[in-house]
Amino acid sequence: MQQNVEVIPPEEHQRRLSWQCRRGLKETDVLLNKYLNEVFLEDTPAHQKMFERLLQCEDADMFLWFTRREEPEDPELAAFVRYFLHRLGPEGGIEA
């Protein structure tokens, strides 16, 4: 039995994710959108999936992670947050 799986062009998928990057905190919006616009399409499928997983997290948690005050309890997500901030360059993260 074959399932119907919708194949979305990468650019359309990116556009859909842009709505999920709109958060309650401007600081998180800026970082999420920067990654989405500058890194996402060129990144590995595994990192793209982790980014989508990151988007499911609470804004307050992301703020703490992006300010490097805390790390996610999940080691896989913690590693991605470090990678995410590193990919955004020396200014990656939010000043505490």
Image (spheres, helix red, strand yellow):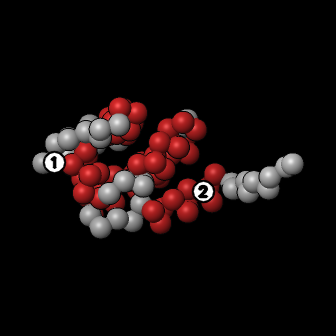
Please name the residue shown 29% across and 51% down the image: 62
The three-letter amino acid code for the residue at tag 2 is His
Q: Which label was assigned to residue 95?
A: 1
SS under mark 1: loop
Asked whether residue 88 appears in the rendered view, the answer is yes
Name the N-terminal-most of marks 2 and 1. 2
Reply above or below: 41 against 21: above
Q: Which label was assigned to residue 13?
A: 2
Reply above or below: 67 against 82: below
| Neighbour tally class for label 1: few under 14, some 14-19, many 20 plus, Cα within 10 Å | few
72 relative position to 44: left or right: left
Q: Position of residue 23 (x, y in %)?
A: 34, 65
Q: Position of residue 80 (x, y in %)?
A: 39, 36
Q: Which label was assigned to residue 26?
A: none
Reply above or below: 83 against 62: above
SS under mark 2: helix
User: In the image shown, does 56 or 28 lie closer to the viewer?
Assistant: 56
43 relative position to 54: left or right: right
Q: Position of residue 7 (x, y in %)?
A: 73, 54
51 relative position to 68: left or right: right
Asked whether residue 39 appears in the rendered view, the answer is no
Please name the residue shown 26% across and 64% down the image: 25
